[in-house]
Image (cartoon, helix red, strand yellow):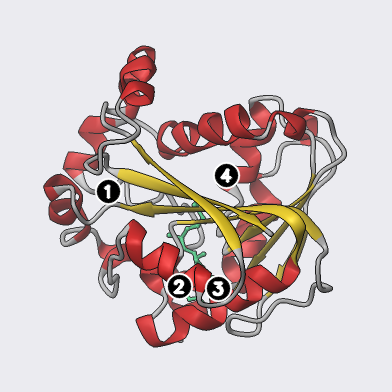
Amino acid sequence: MIGAEFDRHASGYDGGLDNPIKRLMGSSADQFIAVKARWLLRREKALRGGTLALLDYGCGAGDLMRVLAGLGARAAFTGCDVSQGMLAEAAKRWPEQAGPLPQLEMQDGARTPFADGQFDVAVISAVLHHVPPSERPAVYRELGRVLKPGGRLYVFEHNPRNPLVRHVIARTPIDANAILLDAREVRHGLLDCARYDLETDYLMFMPPALGFLGGIDRALAWLPLGAQYAVAARKL
Ligand SMILES: C[S@@+](CC[C@H](N)C(=O)[O-])C[C@H]1O[C@@H](n2cnc3c(N)ncnc32)[C@H](O)[C@@H]1O
């Protein structure tokens, strides 16, 4: 029962920062999230305009939406998750100055309560490695269903090709049941369920704590060794 598993981690959820190596790379979970949020804002400039509908699938404690808002994103935010505890935490952490509280909805397994083609942008960050491989196609189908034609889907995941990532994940309690997947698996999984234009960027070559070295990260985005990757998919 994955929802129940994350209910136990909800209060004080910090994205696995109890791992000492991860703590060396960044002093707060928000520093790690900000790397993805900045990358997303560079690709989706319209996120600052307040008109896009954005779904954060498996939003957990809502940290990505909150950090995005802190960096100036003004979208119609919606989050969903299989864990009621994580959704409650997301509501608790949302600061008033970030704008209206996102709509927060429970998933029924992979399934969400949203209409077909409801979202301009969908994001799924650090979720798929918690989903058993046999259940991943249902997640890809659901993301394809709720995205508008022309909508963009962004999949952020830990990169199993990076040895430090494998070391950290194997020693982090919230990742006890994690099965990492590479960008190729994500691309194939997506294309099995819908038609997309796909691109892949690798992220986090530099520790997030050294944010001023972000230019190096951008120059290396083609190299499949960053700690994270982002698959960007535009639905045709
Ligand atoms: C490591 S947390 C990541 C949370 C958030 N996306 C972030 O980046 O901070 C993984 C989240 O995926 C959620 N989740 C959603 N659907 C899931 C599914 N089908 N199987 C496993 N976990 C799922 C979990 O409940 C949990 O909140």
Question: In terms of sequence position, does the residue under pointer 3 or pointer 1 come before the other?
Answer: 1
The residue sitting at 16% across, 62% down in the picture is 170
Question: Is the shortest distance between ligand 1 and the CB of mark 1 under 8 Å?
Answer: no
Question: Vertical placement of 86 versus 198: above or below?
Answer: below
Labelled pair 2, 3 in contact (Cβ < 8 Å): yes
Residue mark closest to the camera, 2 vs 3: 2
Q: Distance between the residues labelled 1 and 4?
A: 19 Å
User: Which residue in the structure is indicated by mark 2?
Assistant: 189
Question: In terms of sequence position, does the residue under pointer 1 or pointer 4 come before the other?
Answer: 1
Question: In terms of sequence position, does the residue under pointer 4 or pointer 2 come before the other?
Answer: 4
User: Which residue in the structure is indicated by mark 1?
Assistant: 18
* Nearest to the observer: residue 213 or residue 200: 200
Number of the label disc, if any, that sits on residue 140: 3
Residue mark closest to the camera, 2 vs 1: 2
Labelled pair 2, 1 in contact (Cβ < 8 Å): no
User: Which residue in the structure is indicated by mark 4?
Assistant: 64
The residue sitting at 77% across, 60% down in the picture is 149
Q: In this view, does 45 lie to the left or right of 221?
A: right
The percent position of residue 96, horizontal first and vertical second, equals 79, 35
The percent position of residue 86, horizontal first and vertical second, equals 57, 63
Q: In this view, does 197 lie to the left or right of 226?
A: right
Residue mark closest to the camera, 3 vs 1: 3
The picture quadrant where one finds residue 221 is top left
